[in-house]
Amino acid sequence: MREPFQILAIPFRKKNLEEYEFAALKRADLNVWQGVAGGGEQGEIPIEAAKREAKEELGIDDIYLIKLSTISSIPRSCFSQCEYWPEDIFVVPEYSFGVDCTGLKVTISSEHSEIIWGGMNEISSLYQWDSNKTALWELDKRLKLGITV
């Protein structure tokens, strides 16, 4: 059963000594751009779910995550499994991470039809949801300041 939380992981990689690029993944079913996203499986905590989702959606094994402060809320009605959750859960928290893809071969899953790498502004303009844009902005600032823990 799905746990009542969502994760978002923004893929990034080091472009050169001073620059990073970020990824947007195009959902195959909804035709929208986003980061890696998914729900926790029974017994998982958010960081475990983020690692699993990154492995599933990006095809990478060596996963380094940066925990972000960005937390958004999503109405429970957006999730088909909500019928199994307690009635007093009205919104589901979305925990955000950065996932380092530097030097890794990324192979997207069938959940996505396309991946684009680019600068923060370019990728932000593609993202459908504000939560993705906010997490991307925070990740960009953390990387520029060297605050990755």
Image: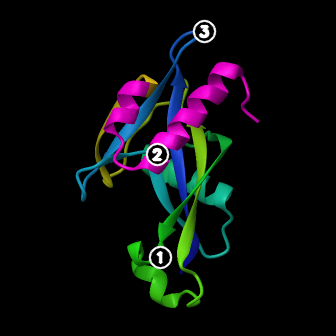
Determine which quarter of the picture holds residue 147: top right
Give, as a three-letter code, the residue at label 1: Arg
In the picture shown, does residue 106 fall above or below 128? above
Rendered-image quadrant of the C terminus: top right
Q: Is residue 16 magenta?
A: no
Q: CA distance from mark 2 to mark 3?
A: 25 Å
Residue 8 percent coordinates (x, y): 52, 51
Furthest residue in direction top, as rendered: 17
Q: Which mark is residue 132?
A: 2
Residue 95 percent coordinates (x, y): 60, 55
Reading the image, the residue beneath label 3 is: 17
Give, as a three-letter code, the residue at label 3: Leu
In the picture shown, does residue 48 fall above or below 84? above
Q: Residues within 10 Å of mark 3 (few under 14, many from 20)?
A: few
Determine which quarter of the picture holds residue 7: bottom right
Residue 103 percent coordinates (x, y): 54, 24
Q: Is residue 100 visible to us here?
A: no
